Image (cartoon, helix red, strand yellow):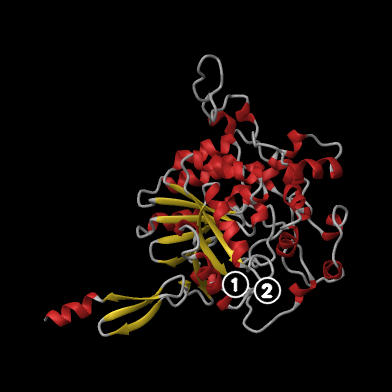
Amino acid sequence: MNVSVLQETDSSDRDVPLGFPVKNGKKRAGSYDPVSLKGSGLIGPGEASKEFLQKHFPGATIDDWNDWKWQIRNSYTSLSQLSMVTELSGTEKQVLLSPGVHLPFRLTPYYASLLSDPEGGQAIRKAMIPGIEELKLTPGEQVDPLNEEATTPVPHLVHRYPDRVLFLATGFCSAYCRYCTRTHLVAKEKVHFNSAWEPAIEYIRQHQEVRDVLISGGDPLTMSDHMLKDLLTQLRSIPHVELLRIGTKVPVVLPQRITHPLTWMLKQFHPLMISIHFTHPAELTPETSEACNRLANAGIPLGSQTVLLKGINDEVAVMKKLMQGLLRIRVRPYYLYQCDPIPGSAHFRTPVSKGLEIIRGLRGFTSGYAVPNYVIDAPGGGGKIPLLPDYFQGTENGNLILKNYEDNVFYYPDAEACVSDRG
């Protein structure tokens, strides 16, 4: 397996402090010591993880399971491998005989253990395991639906918006979602792009309007601490770069990666924010909860990005449970994306009316913090366009006509009309 992250000697443990002060010889709740800094220290493993480990990796230990590099080395990268631990459906078996699947397949053992979840296992299966529907192309689908290549001035950098850029640091993910926007980028063998970062970094240096850099890929948290620190250091050294962001699904599919050394390293680069891709409430496990709390404890604001997917999370009750659960683990719901029209994605895409229905079912019925922005990332490179239910119903006699979450109508005196009346 040509994965450079597994071949590096990571010296990041030398960059962490000796731990928080200890009072009366006892470690305080929430503190950590030098010993725990050497491992992930994640709670658990949870019951699903324990059962999966004992059943399918009888020679492995809990320490192995909690090692994120062990998780990557032992990931399932083909359906024939996965069939050893779960029964494949008819359409999944058909894919074994079909050479046309263009997106790599990979599941960590941890994330594969969630396939048996009685409430969300089928949703995760549909989102992550290729089915024969993936081979059916429909009108409007494109390999690069957001036209990122047209706004790529140098390799691995997308500059679409005026003051921010997207830095594609790697082509590797620890798990591949079947509806991924960047099917044209991710691949098994196209791993970390660190040897080709300099043109992108130099571009940012030369463009003083860039104040915000979103590091994505692939998944940047699959890089080693040393490699990620090197990239963050170079970007933070640019005076006009005010904000660094990381887009990732690692806390969901590989929570073992969120180690104490990693979080200590990341907190050196504030202001730093992390956007995490969540799909279903079944992902809110003890391990993922601890990973997110660990990042939040490092002072890193966390936001969620969820793709609306047919038959997976396209019910108000499911979405409400996910969004409320995210707030409990200190992740602020940020975006709800309409699924991008990549090749073979018709079985994932809902009507836009379904997304509006979900927002209508959240707004007013739960905390405002739990209501994400529903957006379409416009095909062709138009950027994110927010969509809202019709709360604004028009004007009448100088008043705005407003409809609330219960469909009750209210009138608000429009400022412009009031000024006109006084004039």
Q: How many marks?
A: 2
Q: Position of residue 352 (x, y in %)?
A: 56, 77
The amino acid marked with disc number 2 is Ser
Residue at the image point whose x is 58% and y is 35% from the top: 260
Label 1 sits on residue: 340
Q: Is residue 219 left or right of 154 when viewed as pictured?
A: right
| Residue 17 visible at all | yes
Foreground residue, 157 or 252? 252
Q: Which mark is residue 345?
A: 2
Q: Is residue 92 left or right of 308 when viewed as pictured?
A: right
Q: Are marks 2 and 1 in contact (CB under 8 Å)?
A: yes
Residue at the image point whose x is 25% and y is 82% from the top: 398
Q: Is residue 16 left or right of 122 when viewed as pictured?
A: left
Q: Position of residue 35 (x, y in %)?
A: 62, 24
- Dot 2, how many residues are within 10 Å of its Cα: few (below 14), some (14-19), or many (20+)? many
**Mark 2 vs mark 1: which is more N-terminal?**
1
Q: Position of residue 355 (x, y in %)?
A: 56, 72
Per the model, the C-alpha gap separating discs 2 and 1 is 8 Å
Residue at the image point whose x is 42% and y is 56% from the top: 212
Is disc 2 placed on a helix, strand or loop? Answer: loop
Is disc 1 placed on a helix, strand or loop? Answer: loop
Give the farthest residue toward the top.
24
Q: Position of residue 396 (x, y in %)?
A: 30, 85
| Residue 217 visible at all | no
Picture layout, residue 228 above or below residue 145: above
The amino acid marked with disc number 1 is Asp
